[in-house]
Image (cartoon, grey):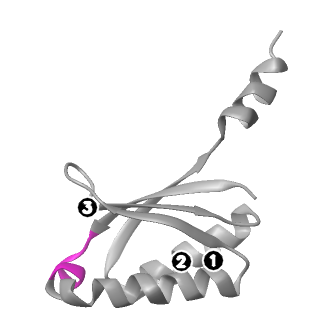
């Protein structure tokens, strides 16, 4: 399954409800599983973003659905990236002229 990385920033609503974040992460895991995705890791980070989520999903449309649903809750804003494994990278560059 393709791998994705979401860069997460808390909104004011999310910051005000920070103590409930572990419960929201658990709910996000369940929501992901219900559409065939799998959250592999959640990290609280320092710097420009507040958290990073690494997950796998069947396809881009599934990711778009999950990110839209997450955004609708109003706790976070995300920027999601498609990540390629080292093996995938090798296959990609093998096609270079």
Q: Position of residue 11 (x, y in %)?
A: 24, 75
Answer whether residue 77 is magenta in the image: no
Sequence-wise, the earlier of marks 3 and 2 is 3
SS state under label 1: helix
Q: In front of the other: label 3 or label 2?
A: 3
- Specify which label sits upstream in the sequence, 1 or 3: 3
SS for dot 2: helix
Q: Quadrant of the N terminus?
A: bottom right
Percent position of residue 61, x then y: 72, 68
Within 10 angstroms of label 2, few (less than 14), some, or many (20 or more) residues? few
Look at the numbered discs 2 and 1 and tell me whether their residues touch, using CB distance below 8 Å. Answer: yes
Q: Which residues are magenta?
A: 10-15
> How far across and down, in percent of the image, does residue 34 sit?
68, 87
| Residue 65 falls in image quadrant | bottom right
Q: Chief secondary structure of the magenta span? A: helix
Q: On residue 92, which mark appears? A: none
Question: What residue does disc 3 label?
Answer: 50
Seen as rendered, the residue at the extreme top is 97
Q: Would you say 21 lies left or right of 12 here?
A: right
Number of residues whose C-alpha sits closer than 10 Å to that of mark 3, classed few (under 14), some (14–19) or many (20 or more): some
Point 74% across, 34% down: residue: 87
Give 29 or 8, whichever is nearer the viewer. 29
Disc 1/disc 3 C-alpha distance (Å):
22 Å
The residue drawn where x is 71% and y is 82% is 35
Q: Residue at x 49, y 83 (%)?
A: 28
Q: Residue beneath label 1, please?
A: 65
Compared with residue 93, is residue 76 higher up or lower down, i.e. above or below? below
Where does label 2 land, which residue?
Answer: 68
Toward the viewer: 25 or 74?
Answer: 25
């Amino acid at each position: 399954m393709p791998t994705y990385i979401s860069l997460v920033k808390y909104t004011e609503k999310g910051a005000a409800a920070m103590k409930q974040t572990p419960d929201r992460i658990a709910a996000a895991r369940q929501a992901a599983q219900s559409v065939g995705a799998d959250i592999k890791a959640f990290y609280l980070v320092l710097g420009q973003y507040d958290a990073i989520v690494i997950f796998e999903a069947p396809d881009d449309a599934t990711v778009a659905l999950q990110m839209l649903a997450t955004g609708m809750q109003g706790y976070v804003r995300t920027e999601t990236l498609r990540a390629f494994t080292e093996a995938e990278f090798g296959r990609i560059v093998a096609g270079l002229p």
